[in-house]
């Protein structure tokens, strides 16, 4: 019996709506992704409205000679995210009659690609959207792309004299560059360098909150956080600034509880605590004027709207309202004027921006063969016992049969090891065993209650589909922290998927697999996919715009993928605006310090020796060298 019976097929009754539900696209797609009547995933880069089929985009890329895997970026989605963020804050500010401005800043570390910075500077210009830099390199990148004197440029992270000088010079050129002090020793450096360069710094202070959020990144906040100053250190900072006669430079209070905060309650607690400290600083005589609430606005990766690490129990509007409402009530109570608000949303700004597309190269599946009805008279008794299990198996005794099957199989393995059963008997036992397990997996679909030990069967029996990508390069968080990203086929959604699948990448590292997926409302151990046909089969991994691109590594020397950017105008017309070729084999070899010219010389020497010993001809040598040289220039991924 083929395993495909694991999923009951009934193609005539299948609809694209069922596909949409199965993959949960309506839950995590946030207006940007949907399924068309033609059974293809549609991207709506402006949110709702006109859209374009991802399958059509792929065809256009292939026609242009861009191979899979490809990271697809949608500039319009980035534009839309920035717009939504500012509009949401704008509404909350109006609703609560908040007196300050909202100014977003983009934390560069979340996706540092030049294209991302350029686009954010462009799309955010209207709102004076700024940047947050955590290192010298990020600061230089920010200064080169952000020339808006109204926008904030927030400097976090450890700063040496050079970092401080860069920021002070930006200040001299009129940029609103703020140093967020992470330690008291850093303050001394800032004071000293500003005297030296004769420019007044804008100083902020990073607060260590006692509020700690749940989720993956909760260690960024809380009293044991490694970053920021506790209240007593904040007071020391004020004293030191007073002593230096520079308290007027203290204008900003910053905190960052952590990324991907799943629970709105933690967001409220943090802002209230920070407002109290802000009031304290105003009462100390600091001019203040800006409250920077850090990042943490979460993305609903699994679409469950739940208070879990891969989701969140609030939306953007609720986030803005919660912040503004709590700020107004805390500050008004203390009669302190409303400051400008900065948030450093990274993930929520760029996650939707990119989709990783790859093709499936191959599948491996359990093939269960027909079993003999009866065995030879002289067959081993244990084999007969195992076959008897097949004959009595039904839903109501499935668990018992499951135990029996394991028992007899293990006994047979023991006998085989001791030499008392033959290879053929051992092989037949395997066939019968998998037949039983497969049938149990099919039966549990009909059972009202499925015992826990049986629940893992479908995953155990799942097909493996080999995808043309590297988990380590393109989805490092899946490997490192079990991050969930929505994954689904981008076409054939009019057909019912008939296979239950676990994905493997082409590194063939046992860690290079994905076996947790986003389902309709819950996570699942297998992904329903279509059987492979002669047509190429494409999957998309969605919401990969944040944190994935530069954390990736060169596992198996699989390099950067091709990157393509598309724009869709309001009439739905598609433009391919940018192309970045992925790494070649020579590129990745040089990253790990190979001398590729030397390598070619060495291969040539090997070939010439083969010519000398007459193993190959001189013409063969030419062909060999051409192949190696073109291999060096080629893509690191599987090429058809
Ligand atoms: C990483 C980081 C951010 C971004 O957090 P998101 O959750 O991605 O919005 C913001 N601020 C600081 C200080 C950070 O370290």
Image: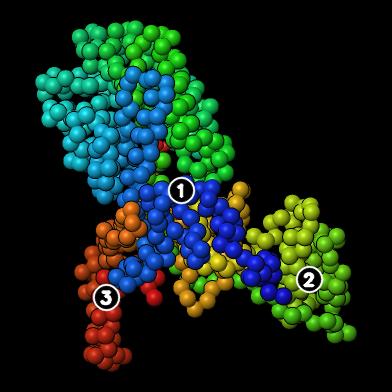
Outermost residue, front side: 571
The kind of secondary structure element at disc 2 is helix
Q: Quadrant of the N terminus?
A: bottom right
Q: In the picture, residue 240 is in which quadrant?
A: top left
The reply, left or right, for residue 276 in relation to residue 182 is right
In percent of the image, x 40 and y 41: which residue is there? 347
The kind of secondary structure element at disc 3 is helix
- Tell me if label 2 and label 1 are in contact, CB under 8 Å: no
Q: Position of residue 397 (x, y in %)?
A: 86, 61
Of the numbered discs 1 and 3, the one sitting upstream in the chain is: 1
In percent of the image, x 51 and y 72: which residue is there? 362
- Spatial separation of the CA atoms under disc 2 and disc 1: 56 Å
Mark 1 vs mark 3: in front: 1
Work out whether residue 138 can be spotted: no
- Spatial separation of the CA atoms under disc 3 and disc 2: 53 Å
- Spatial separation of the CA atoms under disc 1 and disc 3: 43 Å
Residue 376 versus residue 591 in the image, above or below:
below
Of the numbered discs 2 and 1, the one sitting upstream in the chain is: 1
Residue that carries the numbered disc 1 in the rendered image: 31
Residue that carries the numbered disc 3 in the rendered image: 630
């Amino acid at each position: 019996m083929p395993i495909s019976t694991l999923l009951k097929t009934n193609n005539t009754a299948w609809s694209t709506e069922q596909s949409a539900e199965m993959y949960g696209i309506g839950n995590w797609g946030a207006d940007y992704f949907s399924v068309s009547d033609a059974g293809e995933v549609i991207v709506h880069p402006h949110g709702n409205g006109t859209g374009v089929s991802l399958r059509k985009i792929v065809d256009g890329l292939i026609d242009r000679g861009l191979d899979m895997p490809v990271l697809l970026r949608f500039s319009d989605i980035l534009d839309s995210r920035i717009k939504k963020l500012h509009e949401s804050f704008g509404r909350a500010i109006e609703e609560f009659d908040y007196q300050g401005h909202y100014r977003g800043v983009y934390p560069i570390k979340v996706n540092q690609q030049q294209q991302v910075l350029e686009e954010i500077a462009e799309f955010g210009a209207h709102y004076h959207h700024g940047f947050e830099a955590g290192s010298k390199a990020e600061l230089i990148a920010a200064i080169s792309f952000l020339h808006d004197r109204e926008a904030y440029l927030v400097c976090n992270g450890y700063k040496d004299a050079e970092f401080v000088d860069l920021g002070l010079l930006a200040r001299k050129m009129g940029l609103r560059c703020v140093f967020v002090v992470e330690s008291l020793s850093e303050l001394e450096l800032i004071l000293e360098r500003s005297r030296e360069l004769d420019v007044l710094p804008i100083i902020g202070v990073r607060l260590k909150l006692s509020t700690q959020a749940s989720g993956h990144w909760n260690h960024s906040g809380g009293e044991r956080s490694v970053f920021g100053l506790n209240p007593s250190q904040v007071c020391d900072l004020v004293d030191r600034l007073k002593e230096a006669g520079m308290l007027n430079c203290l204008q900003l209070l910053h905190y960052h509880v952590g990324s991907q905060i799943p629970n709105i309650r933690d967001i409220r607690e943090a802002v209230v605590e920070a407002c109290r400290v802000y009031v304290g600083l105003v009462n100390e005589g600091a001019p203040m004027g800006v409250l920077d609430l850090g990042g943490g606005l979460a993305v609903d990766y699994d679409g469950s709207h739940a208070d879990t690490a891969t989701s969140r129990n609030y939306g953007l509007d609720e986030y803005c309202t919660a912040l503004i409402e709590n700020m107004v009530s805390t500050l008004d109570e203390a009669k302190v004027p409303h400051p400008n608000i900065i948030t450093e949303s990274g993930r929520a700004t760029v996650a939707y921006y990119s989709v990783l597309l790859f093709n499936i190269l191959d599948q491996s599946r359990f093939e269960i063969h027909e079993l003999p009805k009866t065995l030879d008279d002289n067959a081993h008794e244990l084999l007969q016992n195992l076959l008897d299990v097949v004959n009595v198996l039904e839903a109501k005794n499935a668990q018992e049969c499951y135990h029996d099957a394991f028992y007899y199989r293990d006994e047979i393995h023991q006998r085989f090891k001791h030499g008392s059963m033959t290879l053929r008997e051992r092989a037949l036992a395997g066939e019968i065993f998998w037949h039983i397990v497969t049938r149990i997996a099919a039966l549990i679909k009909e059972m009202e209650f499925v015992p826990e030990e049986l629940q893992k069967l479908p995953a155990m029996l799942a097909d493996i589909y080999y995808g043309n990508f590297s988990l380590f390069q393109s989805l490092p968080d899946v490997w490192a922290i079990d991050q969930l990203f929505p994954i689904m086929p981008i076409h054939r959604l009019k057909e019912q998927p008939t296979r239950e699948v676990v994905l493997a990448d082409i590194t063939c590292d046992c860690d290079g697999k994905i076996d947790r997926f986003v389902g309709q409302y819950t996570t699942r151990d297998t992904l329903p996919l279509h059987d492979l046909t002669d047509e190429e089969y494409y999957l998309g991994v969605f919401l990969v715009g944040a944190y994935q691109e530069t954390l990736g590594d060169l596992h198996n020397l699989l390099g950067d993928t091709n990157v393509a950017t598309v724009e869709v105008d309001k009439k739905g017309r598609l433009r391919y605006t940018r192309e970045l070729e992925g790494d070649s084999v020579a590129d990745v070899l040089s990253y790990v310090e190979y001398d590729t010219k030397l390598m070619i010389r060495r291969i040539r020497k090997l070939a010439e020796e083969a010519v000398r010993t007459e193993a190959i001809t001189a013409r063969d040598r030419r062909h060999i060298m051409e192949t190696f040289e073109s291999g060096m220039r080629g893509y690191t991924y599987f090429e058809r």
